[in-house]
Amino acid sequence: MKKRFYSLAGLFAAGALALAACGGSSGGPGATVNTDGYKTVKADSLPASPTLDAIKARGKIVIGTKFDQPLFGLQNPTNGQIDGFDAEIGRLLALRIFGDPGKVSFIESVSKNREPYIQQGKVDAVIATYTINATRKKLVDFAGPYYVAGQDIMVKANDTSIAGVTDLNGKKVCTVTGSTSATNLKKFAPTAQPLLLDTYSSCAEALSDGRVQAVTTDNVVLLGLISRNPGKYKLLGKSFTQEPYGIGLKKGDDAFRSFVNDTLATAYTNGDWARAFTETVGAVEKTTPTPPALDRYTHS
Amino acid sequence: MNVVLHHLGLYWSGLWVTLELTVLSFMCALLVGTVVAVMRVSPAAPLRAAGLLYVETVRNTPPLLLLFLFVYGLPKVGLIYSLFVSAVVVLGGYTGAFVAEVIRSGINAVPVGQGEAARSLGLTFSQTLRHVVLPQAFRTMVPPLGNLLTALVRNTSLAAPIGVLELTERADQLNATAAAPVPIFIGVLITYMIVTLPLGAVIGAVERRVAVAR
Amino acid sequence: MLYDVPGPRGRRRILVGSIVAALVIGALAAVALVRLAHHGQLDAARWKFVTEPSILRYLMFGLLNTLKVAAVAGGLALAVGALMAVGRLAPSVLVRAGATSYVQFCRSLPVLPLILFIGLGFPELGVRLPAFWFLVVGLALYNSAVFAEIFRAGVVSLPRGQREAAYALGLTYWGTMRLVLLPQAVRRVLPATLSQFVVLLKDSSLGFVISYPELLRRGQITGEFTHSILQVYVVVAVIYIIVNATLSYLVHRLERRQKRAPTVRPAAGASPLSTPTGRAAVRAGGKELTGR
C-alpha cells in the first residue's frame, strides 16, 4: 500500500514536472497573412548589444503587447494569434533580426505592467500603445515614436451630455491603471470621478453597463473599441493631448535602441509601416498619416 | 520605504474599505448560511435539493469568477449594482455556502439523544432547534466559523480586480505610478497580517473557552 | 434527529410544503429565464462559441495551464506542508518555533497581494522566472501552511501508542514521523487535504494578474472577442464546477472507504510488538495494523 502510494505520488510529480516543462503558453508566434508582403529584410549585421545577444541566443524576440486592444494588440481566441498594429511592428523587428516574421512571441502586458516587464527583462521590448513621456523615460528607454495619437473621450452613442473634456468634471469616467490617460484625466478634469480598471475592454463593458458615463484614452484605442461594437459608442473627436507611441526598451542599451530606430526608419521608407497601418488601424482610420519623426535622443 | 510612509493615508483608506467589506460580507454570509443550512436539513425535498445545488455550485467556482459574473454578467440582463455592494453580496454569498456546511455539521455533531429528549418533552421542530440543538451546535461551530472569517478578510482582496478601492487595489494603483513593488506590497501584506494575526489569536482564545470537554 | 418520523398529518404537511417550495423555485427559475431571453442572452449567436473547436481549444489550453500550475503548486505545498507539520511537533524548541512562525505567518497572507508581491517584486530583487513559477511559489507558500495544519491535526489524532511503540523500537523523532506517524496521518486527513487542493485550484485563477494565461483570463478574452461575456463566464464556471466536483467526489469516495477500514487492531490477545512480524509492521508504518 505504501509502495503503491509512493509510486503513484512519484508518477504524479513526474507528470506534473513534465507538463510544467512544456512551458507556459503565451501568444502564438505571428505568421499572419500580412507578413508575406513585407519588404524589410534581415539585417546584414547586428550591432553588439546585450539585448540582441539574448534575442539571438533565444532564437526569437519576446514582445510585450496588449491582448485585448482592437487594432493594436488583440488576441484571437480561435487561433491564439495576436493581431494589430503593435503586433505587426513586432513582426517587422523579428523580420529584421531573423529574416522570419514568425520568430516572435508575445506576452500580455497590461498598462501597469509595461515598465516592470521591461526592467525585469521579462520582455525584450514593449509595443503596447505605449506613450513616451519624461516620467517613463526615467525608468525605460524609447525607440520611435512610430505613431502619434491623441487622448479623446468615448461615450454611449446616444449620449449628448458630454461635449468636451471639461464636461467630464463630476462624472464617472473609466480609464486604465498606470496609463497616461489616468494622469491626464486628473489634469484636465480634476473633479471627474475615475474608475480605474486593468484593461480598456473592461472599461468599455463598464460604459455599456452604465457604471460610468465615459471612457477616456487615446483616440485610436477608442476607435478600435467602437469598431468592435458597431453603433454602441461614439468618439467625441476632440483630442486634447498628443500621445506619441514608442517602443519601450531596457534603459541603457543604446545599441539596441539604434537598431530598432533603424528598423522603423527602413519601414517608413520602404512602405512596410504604411502597409502595417492600412491592414490594421486602417480599418477605422481611412487616411494613412505620414510616419512621425523618430526621436533618437542621447542620454545627457 | 519612503513610498509607503508618504502614502500611509492610502493604506488607511484601503484598510478601512477592507474592514467594511469584511464585516458586511460576514453578516451577509451568516444570514445566507443559516437559511441554506435550514434548507438542507428541512424535510421538504425540493428545499434540500435547492440548498445542495447552491452549496455545490458556489463552493466549486472560484470566487473571482463569481465576482465577474455578478459585475459583468448581471448588467447584461439589466441588473446593475455598485461595485461595493456587488463585492459584499458575492463574498457574502460565497462564504455563506461554507457557513451553511459548518452549521449543518455543527447540528449533526449534536448527539441524537438531545433531539430525542427534546421531542419527548414535547418541543416542536423550531423549538428543538432554537433551545436545544443550536446552542450546543454553536460551540463546535466557533472554530470553523472563525477560520471562515479570517479567510473572508483575505478574500476581500479579490474585490481589487473589479475596481473596489480596498487595500490591495490602493496599493496596486500606487505601484502603477510609484513603481516600487517591494516596499509597497510588503506594506500591504503586513497590513493584512495586522488584521488576521490578532483575529486568529482572538478566535483561538474564544475556541478554548467554548470548547466542549467530551 | 430534529423531528420525529412524521405521521399522516405531518406527511401531508411536508408534501404540501414540498409542492409549494418546488413551485416557488420553479417560478424563480422561470423569471430568470424570461429575463435572460428578454435581453437576448439566450440567442443562439451568443452561444455559438461553444461549437467552435478553435475557441474550445483555446479555452481547454487555458484549463490545462490552470491544472499545470495547480498540480505543481499542490505538490510543492504538500511536501513543504508535511515538513512544517513535522517541525511543529519536533522536540527541539528552535525547530518548533521556526515551523510555527512559518505556518502562522503564511496562513495569514491573502493570496492575491502575495502573488502581486512575488510576481512584481521578485524581479526587482533580481529573481527572473516565468509567471508560471511566480504563481506556483505564491500558491505553494500559502497552501503549505494550511496543509501543515491539516497534517498536524492528523498526527495529533493518532493514538499515542503508535508514537510510543516507535520510540520503543529505537526510532528517532524524524524516523518516527517518516515511517510511522505521517503515513497514517496523511491517510486520515486525505479528505481535508483534497478539499484544500480544490481551494488551491480555484486560487490559480488569480494568475491573470501576472499575465499567466489560465482559464479565467482566456474566458475573459473570449467573452470580449465574441461579445458574449455572460455566456462565456457561465461556461467557464461550469468547467470549474465539473473539475472541482470531480475532485470532491473522489474525496467523498475516499471518506467512505476510510470509514469502512478498521483502525488499529492488534491480533487477538497478543500485542503487535511481541512478534517479529508485528514489529516489522510498526516499522513499515502500521500497514498490517490498519488491516488493509
Image (cartoon, helix red, strand yellow):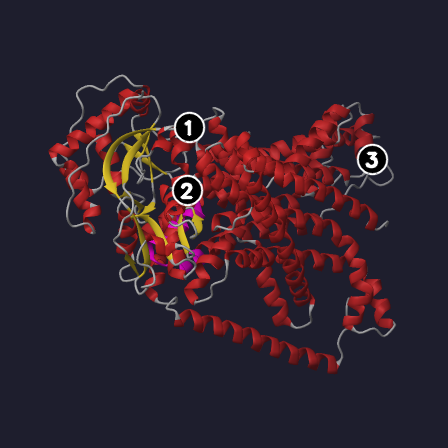
Task: Specify start and end residues of the magenta stretch as a single range.
Answer: C212-235
Q: Secondary structure at mark 2?
A: loop
Chain under callout 1: A
Query: Looking at the picture, does residue C38 appear above or below residue A84?
Result: below
For the C terminus of chain A, which image quadrant? top left
The subunit carrying tag 2 is: C
Find residue C213 and name its label.
2
Q: Are marks 2 and 3 in contact (CB under 8 Å)?
A: no
Which residue position holds label 3?
C161
Quarter of the picture holding the N terminus of chain A? top right
Q: Magenta span: helix, strand or loop, mainly? A: helix
A211 or C216, which is in the foreground?
A211
Relative depth, front residue between A272 and B43: A272
Decide if residue A14 is in sight here.
Answer: no
Q: Is residue C234 magenta?
A: yes
Q: Which residue corresponds to the image point at 69% horizontal and 55% vertical from the top-left?
A: B102
Q: Could you tell me residue C250's position as x and y percent?
A: 59, 50
Q: Which mark is residue A120?
A: 1
Chain of residue at mark 3: C
For residue A89, what is the image quadrant? top left
Residue A205 placement, left or right of A37: right
View extreme (top): residue = A48
Residue C38: x and y in percent read 39, 72
Q: CA distance from mark 2 to mark 1?
A: 19 Å
Identified by mark 1, the residue type is Gln
Q: Measuring from the top left, give residue A297's x and y in whole percent.
A: 26, 25
Residue B191 shows up from this direction: yes
Residue B88 at what x, y percent from top left?
Answer: 57, 57
Whether the magenta-drawn stretch holds residue A264 is answered as: no
In the rendered image, residues at marks 2 and 3 fall on the same chain = yes
